[in-house]
């Protein structure tokens, strides 16, 4: 099980899954793969395609675990005081604002502005995986800043999804979801042999109600993770993390990357494609570096050297999972396919740049030991 929890293994598996999706979509198996992805089945009141069961259902597990990690960091980790939270918070905000502005500047008009959230995300699993591969000798505060930054970035992404991608809000299911989520949280603090099955039932019910409300159902995973008691949350995360790493995220990566290569010249590609290519690696690098440097100038305590911050900022440009989800929510058709490829290319560029810079910093710390 240790391998299934490995950040390195998770990053490699994610990349391999994305490659599988691209290969399937551009092979003789494309029609069959698309038919499987579009096949519908459901439960009473909910009928979704296999693709949407993965994107709206399984991915809620990933956000549930991300929320548990966020809660832990807020209570016991790198975000448990305003002083600790200042640098990663300002860095994360900078890493959202600059890429969004770059996207809007490059992809002006034609309704493409809806895609501005796409380059604002950082993929926790992929970024930490690259760090685990090339950064074994780095000081603990290097990883701590990257983790805190990515967690805050995910929180911002969650707020963006809730605020900008909610359509046709249905208040009744949403109002019904509130007591279900609160009951889930209350029950998690109680003992008893029936607690686990009841929590599972309440969690699934909360997910279904949020889905029916028109809010993206991954928000249900977030709220459930935030209200859960510390001890059972830690046990649940430990139990589900291998499944998230080996099934949830790879399945999402395959489905999200199931797009054909565009039959167009580079000059004919959508401006949104080029906006993501630039905004994700470059915007994150500039925004996170500027935000962290500004915050470190205001904060007291230990400071990371600027080269460390630049390496962290480069890793922050790995959008991948959450950027692909944002693309699914913002666009459809040919534009969505092109932007999916842009997210994969931009994340790979950021991974290479971030990996090289991190390896150089790793070598520096090895020399000074």
Image (cartoon, rainbow, N blue to C red):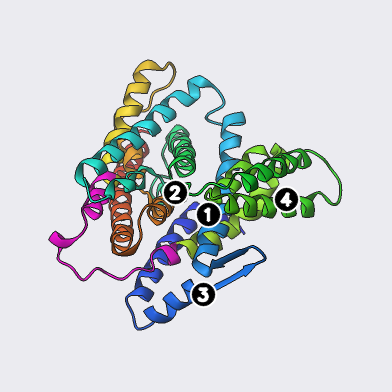
| Quadrant holding the C terminus | top left
Which element carries disc 1, helix, strand or loop?
A: loop
Say which residue label 4 marks: 202
Dot 1 or dot 2, earlier in sequence: 1
Q: Position of residue 24 (x, y in %)?
A: 38, 75
The magenta-colored residue range is: 253-279
Figure check: 360 above or below 304: below
Left or right: where does residue 106 sit relative to residue 231? left
**Residue sitting nearer the eye, 144 or 269:** 269
Residue 65 visible somewhere in the drawing: no
Q: Is residue 34 above or below residue 239?
A: below
Using residue 116 as the reference point, say whether residue 153 is left or right of it: right
- Mark 1 vs 2: CB contact within 8 A: yes
Q: Is label 4 in contact with label 3 (beta carbons under 8 Å)? A: no
| The N terminus lies in quadrant | bottom right
Residue 69 x %, y %: 57, 41
The answer to if 338 sits in the magenta stretch is no
Crowd tier of the residue under label 2, counting other residues whose Cα lies within 10 Å: few below 14, some 14–19, many 20 or above: some
Instruction: Give the image location of residue 287, x and y in percent.
Output: 30, 34
Sequence-wise, the earlier of marks 1 and 3 is: 1
Q: Name the mark on residue 132.
A: 2
| x 37%, y 54%: residue | 327
Q: Are marks 2 and 3 in contact (CB under 8 Å)?
A: no
- Badge number at residue 75: none
Q: Nearer the viewer, mark 1 or mark 3?
A: 3
Taking the spot 35% from the left edge, 56% from the top edge, the residue there is: 331
| Contact flag, marks 1 and 3 (Cβ < 8 Å) | no
């Amino acid at each position: 099980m240790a391998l299934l929890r490995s950040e390195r293994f998770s990053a490699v598996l994610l990349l391999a899954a994305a490659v599988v999706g691209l290969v399937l979509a551009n092979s003789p198996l494309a029609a069959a793969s698309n038919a499987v992805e579009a096949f519908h089945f459901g439960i009473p009141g909910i009928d979704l395609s296999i693709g949407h069961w993965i994107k709206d259902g399984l991915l809620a597990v990933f956000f549930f675990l991300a929320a548990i990690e966020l809660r832990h960091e807020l209570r016991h980790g790198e975000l448990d005081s305003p002083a600790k939270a200042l640098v990663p918070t300002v860095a994360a905000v900078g890493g959202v604002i600059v890429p969004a502005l770059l996207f809007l500047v490059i992809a002006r008009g034609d309704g493409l502005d809806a895609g501005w959230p796409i380059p604002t995300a950082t993929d926790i699993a992929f970024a930490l995986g690259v760090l685990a591969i090339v950064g074994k000798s780095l000081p603990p505060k290097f990883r701590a800043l990257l983790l805190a930054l990515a967690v805050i970035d995910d929180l911002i992404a969650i707020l963006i999804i809730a605020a900008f991608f909610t359509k046709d809000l249905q208040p009744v299911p949403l109002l019904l979801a509130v007591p279900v989520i609160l009951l889930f949280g209350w029950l998690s603090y109680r003992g008893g042999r029936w607690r686990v099955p009841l929590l599972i039932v309440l969690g699934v019910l909360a997910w279904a109600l949020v889905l029916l409300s028109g809010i993206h159902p991954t928000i249900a995973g977030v709220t459930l993770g935030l209200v859960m008691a510390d001890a059972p949350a830690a046990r649940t995360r430990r139990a589900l993390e291998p499944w998230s790493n080996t099934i949830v995220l790879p399945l999402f990566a395959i489905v999200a990357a199931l797009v054909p290569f565009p039959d167009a010249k580079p000059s004919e590609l959508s401006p949104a494609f080029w906006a993501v290519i630039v905004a994700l690696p470059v915007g994150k690098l500039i925004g996170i570096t500027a935000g962290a440097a500004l915050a470190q100038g205001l904060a007291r305590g230990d400071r990371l050297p600027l080269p460390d911050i630049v390496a962290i900022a480069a890793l922050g440009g790995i959008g991948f999972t959450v950027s692909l989800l944002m693309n699914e929510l913002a666009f459809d058709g040919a534009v969505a396919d092109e932007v999916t490829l842009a997210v994969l290319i931009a994340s790979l560029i950021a991974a290479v740049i971030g990996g090289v810079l991190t390896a150089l910093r790793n070598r520096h710390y090895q020399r000074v030991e």
